[in-house]
Image (cartoon, helix red, strand yellow):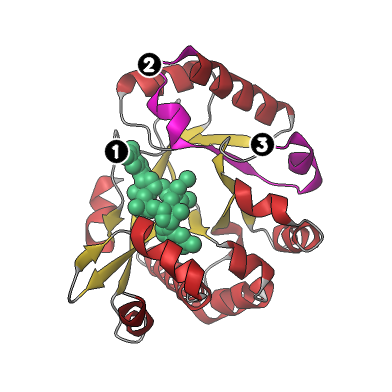
Amino acid sequence: MEAELKQALQNKEFELYYQPQFSIKENQFVGAEALIRWNSPTRGLVSPAVFIPLAEETGLIREIGKWVLFEACLQGKTWLDQGFNIKRLAVNVSAQQLYLDDLQSQIQLALQQTGFPSSLLELEVTEGTLIESNRVIQPLFKALQDQGISIAIDDFGTGYSSLSYLKRFSVDILKIDKSFVDDIETDKDDRAIIRAIISMAHSLELKVLAEGVETQAQKAFLSKQGCDFYQGYLKSRPLPVKEFLDSV
Ligand code: C2E
Ligand code: CA
Ligand code: CA
């Protein structure tokens, strides 16, 4: 698979799907997350849950991540040119892009080459990524935010959930991990954790997005707790570009 993955970029086998995000109260479209897919000629559609870990192990993630960034900005600009107000476009960024690459220059270049406005770009960084080191991250986030780019903490609640780093790195959005949302209806501890995350985030003036929302009951609970945004199969799966506009 590693050999095939190496060829995949060059052979244009990757594609970005987009999952729309909505406000909970008004159910209004607020943005989308870009999620990579691999259309392998030998394996069919391969899930990122399978090939992203391999890409990380082999370092290929750096090239793939660069492509994702550019492709998402290009698509965002195309939508804007077509008159579709995309609002916010979130791109997943891996640890290696943060620590090994000059991410700021890469983003600058992608924005320049595509003409996509920085204020509509959001970077999703997993909670686990942040704890490893912070000397690099703090100034990087600050510089990106000065350009109008927003930062979301992905899979929030699954790592150490250190409150001090939320203060230290100024971030804009917390994405409550799907594992907590899954058990809203059955597990009172998960409900308590969600309540705590939302109230803490709001005290720190951060927005909260719940991911993996699949049922009305989950959405109702999140809404009652004051969660700001959500995404999930309840509203829409990640979709290829040609189906995306019909879903929002
Ligand atoms: P993630 O960033 O946490 O993305 C959310 C995952 O949950 C996506 O899986 C999405 O399709 C799925 N999902 C969304 N709503 C629901 C729902 O209601 N129910 C269920 N069961 N699942 C839902 P996907 O697309 O398979 O991606 C898996 C992971 O692969 C992502 O998790 C992310 O960590 C990674 N990934 C995907 N695209 C990229 C990328 O461009 N760059 C990097 N570095 N990682 C990526
Ligand atoms: Ca994500
Ligand atoms: Ca996530």
**Is residue 177 highlighted in magenta?**
yes
Can you give x and y, in whole percent of width and height, for residue 72 in the image?
Answer: 44, 67
- Element under disc 3: loop
Nearer to the camera, 160 or 182: 160
**Is residue 56 highlighted in magenta?**
no
Can you give x and y, in whole percent of width and height, for residue 158 in the image?
Answer: 56, 38
Q: Is mark 1 within 8 Å of ligand 1?
A: yes
Query: How much space separates mark 3 and mark 2, taking CA atoms?
Result: 23 Å
Nearer to the camera, 165 or 59: 59
Q: Which mark is residue 161?
A: 3
In this rendering, the answer to whether 101 lies above or below 229 is below
**Three-letter amino acid code of the residue under disc 2:** Glu
Q: What residue did someone put label 1 on?
A: 233
Can you give x and y, in whole percent of width and height, for residue 238 in the image?
Answer: 31, 51
Q: What residue did someone put label 2 on?
A: 185
- The answer to which quarter of the image holds residue 10 is bottom left
- Residue at image point 38% right, 37% down: 212
Going from the N terminus, do you reach mark 3 or mark 1 first?
Answer: 3
Query: How much space separates mark 2 and mark 1, taking CA atoms?
Result: 16 Å
Can you give x and y, in whole percent of width and height, for residue 240 in the image?
Answer: 26, 60
**Three-letter amino acid code of the residue under disc 3:** Ser
Query: How much space separates mark 3 and mark 1, taking CA atoms?
Result: 26 Å
